[in-house]
Image (tube, rainbow, N blue to C red):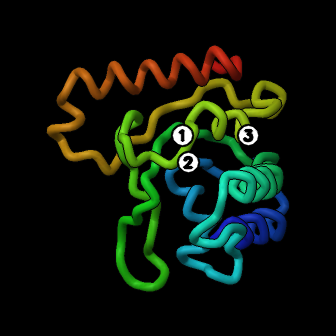
Amino acid sequence: MHSWRDVLDLLEAVGMPETVGFQADLAHSYLYLMGYNAPEHALVAPAHDEDAFWTAYETMTDALRPWTIDFHVAQNDGEVHGSGSHEKTGKHCPADDPNGRLDIVRCAGYWLKDARERGIEHICWDGCMFPNATLEDPGTWNTILDVMIRVRDVHGTD
């Protein structure tokens, strides 16, 4: 989907929340805020400050959270993966990347608000864009597990 607004419009048009839902991913949804694929739906300017980020993040998550059926914890350094005018997606980076722009635990809380009541029982780490060498490094998994445990401890998910 090109933007948070396009996703919401589609979900509302289909109107079947028991069947069709949204897979929230911290790395991908971060780009929705900046409007990489749909500038008309950007919620922050490229040079946004922290207050603007959290206001925009709340707007986006409040709109999409009721439709969220799956949640991927991830980190994003603000870069994109893909090409063309509509293929850009959030580029995952390691959880402890010094260029990571997300407060992973705080961001997760916006998506996981009332998770149990909405039927979300599990969360996962999404590192689909990592090279094999990164995935084969035990340190990568120790860092990921540390972040996942912090998300669970703060937000009460399994």
Q: Which quadrant is home to the C terminus?
A: top right
**Foreground label between 3 and 1:** 3
In this rendering, the answer to whether 6 lies above or below 121 is below
Q: Are marks 1 and 2 in contact (CB under 8 Å)?
A: yes
**Image position of 88 (left or right of 61):** left
Query: Which residue occupies the extreme left position in the image?
Result: 133
Residue sitting at x 67%, y 52%:
50
Residue 116 visible to an observer of this rendering: yes
Locate residue 29: give its quadrant.
bottom right
Q: Element at badge 1?
A: strand
Residue sitting at x 50%, y 51%:
27
Q: Element at badge 3?
A: helix
The numbered mark at residue 25 is: 2
Q: Amino acid at mark 3?
A: Tyr
**Earlier along the polypeptide chain: callout 1 or callout 2?**
2
3D distance between C-alphas at marks 3 and 1: 13 Å
In this rendering, the answer to whether 146 lies above or below 57 is above
Which residue occupies the foreground of this view, 101 or 59? 101
Q: Element at badge 2?
A: strand
**Earlier along the polypeptide chain: callout 2 or callout 3?**
2
**Earlier along the polypeptide chain: callout 3 or callout 1?**
1
Residue 79 picture location, percent across and down: 40, 62
Residue tagged 1: 72
